[in-house]
Amino acid sequence: QPVEATDDAFWDQFWADTATSVQDVFALVPAAEIRAVREESPSNLATLCYKAVEKLVQGAESGCHTEKERQIVLNCCRLLTRILPYIFEDPDWRGFFWSTVPGAGRGGGDEDDENARPLAESLLLAVTDLLFCPDFTVQSHRRSTVDTAEDIHSIDSCEYIWEAGVGFAHSPQPNYIHDLNRTELLKLLLTCFSEAMYLPPSSDSSNTNPWVQFFCSTENRHALPLFTSLLNVVCAYDPVGYGIPYNHLLFSDYREPLVEEAAQVLIVTLDYDSSTSSSPTVDGTTTGTAMDDVDPPGPDNLFVNYLSRIHREEDFQFILKGVARLLSNPLVQTYLPNSAKKIQFHQELLVLFWKLCDFNKKFLFFVLKSSDVLDILVPILYFLNDARADQSRVGLMHIGVFILLLLSGERNFGVRLNKPYSVRVPMDIPVFTGTHADLLIIVFHKIITSGHQRLQPLFDCLLTIVVNVSPYLKSLSMVAANKLLHLLEAFSTTWFLFSAVQNHHLVFFLLEVFNNIIQYQFDGNSNLVYAVIRKRNVFHQLANLPTDSQSIQKGLQRKKKTPEPISRTNSQDGVSMEGSRPAAPAEPGTLKTSLVATPGIDKLTEKSQVSEDGTMRSLEPEASQLSPEGNPPGALSDGEPWSGEPSHSRRDRRRLSSASSSGQWTPTPDWVMSWKSKLPLQTIMRLLQVLVPQVEKICIDKGLTDESEILKFLQHGTLVGLLPVPHPILIRKYQANSGTAMWFRTYMWGVIYLRNVDPPIWYDTDVKLFEIQRV
């Protein structure tokens, strides 16, 4: 039966107990009980929530000077973390925290304006005050504590930022009690924000999260110091244990849980659809709203605003170094096993890095300007290679590829890839000597030939990245050159070309790579030219691809004998690197969360043409007027995305992109002709026409079977004046769109759901944003 709100003795028992931990609260308050109270005595649940928030507000007001008050605040914090998901899962309760509680003024009628605050707002404001509470979550600046307790409303929280870094030079003394208290409060914040998990995914970007919206608004007087504290705590974290190997085995690290929580809160507050709030300018770049004088449409998220305004070189350096250090942490592990603490929050870091590049173009250019970009690239390639066989890590594969797609839209990225690759991170790939470009191509080849089926929608993206960097690659190794030709061989078999409506795009992308290298980087690329000459029959077969229906049928018959989409044969894989472990599939029973479909490559990117002076101009507007399909005649048709429309469910997508789709769609001679006539083979055919007779002559004259002589000849050869006029370089730049914004939201919350297992905040509640599946 309902208990009166005034019955303090009853309610106080919930938070008076001294020795609880958040795990205890989860054990003592089972899910079934919370749901029972919600259904059977809703007024008690309402009073409990209201009372717990009231205690937090009182703690924030008083400044938590006694141990008892701090204990009460922490217990209320844990209790609300436990209960909130059950409030969110019931649509009837979802508005509860946004309603005002009648007669809930804080003593007397002189505070009428305060009465009007919804419970959610009081809760968020109390938590932010508590995050800068001297001697509870921050070091007190007062020397004597006698009577001069700092008034929590008069302190300038900017002097209490948690860690040195962006906009703050002083590094406070580490205090593990403060770290633990901050972590508990941030867990509660994250739980407040998690209402987003209980709404189904929608492409409507206007449904902003009311909790995040209020928290990141000017109503939160601590927004700036809190943003800075979260960012600095993450970027300054060094898990190695202050440079002493094996140190983490001696000391428990109180920082790590705080860093994880901070990273998660940060990415959630930055969940913002930039495609709806930015306008392309003349040069095709996008102007960030934060720099404009006019107010952007819609609510202004201060965290996004602050992030987009960071501009000092030393701040960029601090962020980039921090993110690179943390992303490289799992790789460092392999030199001295267990010498450093292995962090688990690399997915949150990748989302954070993505947000930084997406919302702050100056940061993106800073990253590309320094060779530190390679310190981001190598860990990403390591994660991609490691996760390629694991069904539960499809999301990680996507975000890694998205980041590389974003970077590859800028010329500097391609140029940086020419740096020799000397760090030997043990990876399950063939041994090679070469540059970072070789590493990228070899890893991509591995993903395509030995990843699992669900990665097929990423092939377009992977090859687009290679196309984007190809005009700048000075010298590919023989291993990488062979990998590219092996991909062309696999993708140009008749059954693969005829078995799905968009498979031929992959051949177009690869031909574009070869054309770019031959036209713009012929001199240093004798390995690739030699590989093209050796595999010349592949190009001849493409040029003579049959288009009559009988041959099409015959081509499709062939696939029934070869079920594997890409043969492993004739890809001389050689020995894998020393110390590497093969990429393993997920353990059966591993939990994973579903993801929404990603937009096709034509929606993800827009074409830009590189002028002779290196500037880019966007091609989209003119192209769309040229022909009904939105492609200039003769240009590469980027046509239908892999996944059909983004609205397709996962199952449909798999059906569409798998070879078994002949049921709904059958290739016709007209269809084959429509793209075969556009295959960009002229440059390669001309190259073969000129070089093959010369190479054959050398072989006959000198009775050569030795590659090195031929390579030497090709190194000194030239095709100046013999090739067709170089085509303009086309770059496909990532463009923000609401499809990817929604993908990021489901991915990010899925990661947060799966990573919070102790205590399991959302486990077994009725989330709607994604499905929880077992591998």
Image: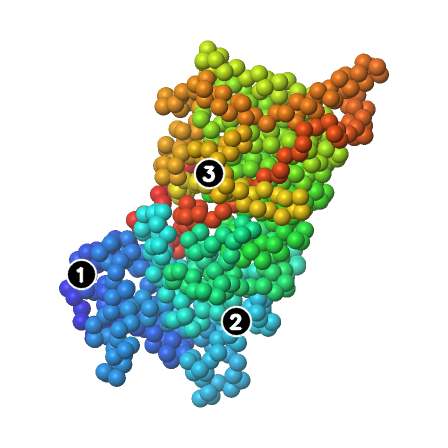
Distance CA(mark 1)–CA(mark 3): 64 Å
Distance CA(mark 2)–CA(mark 3): 54 Å
Which residue shows up at 35% across the image and 62% down it? 211
N-term mark: 2 or 3: 2
x then y, percent, for residue 198? 32, 51
Q: Residue 161 carries which label?
A: 2
Q: Is residue 105 left or right of residue 676?
A: left
N-term mark: 1 or 2: 1
Which residue shows up at 41% across the image and 37% down it? 775
x then y, percent, for residue 467? 60, 37
Camera-nearest label, 1 or 2? 2
Camera-nearest label, 2 or 3? 3
User: Dot 3 corresponds to which residue?
Assistant: 625
Which quadrant does the N terminus fall into? bottom left
N-term mark: 1 or 3: 1
On screen, residue 116 above or below 585: below
x then y, percent, for residue 638? 49, 34
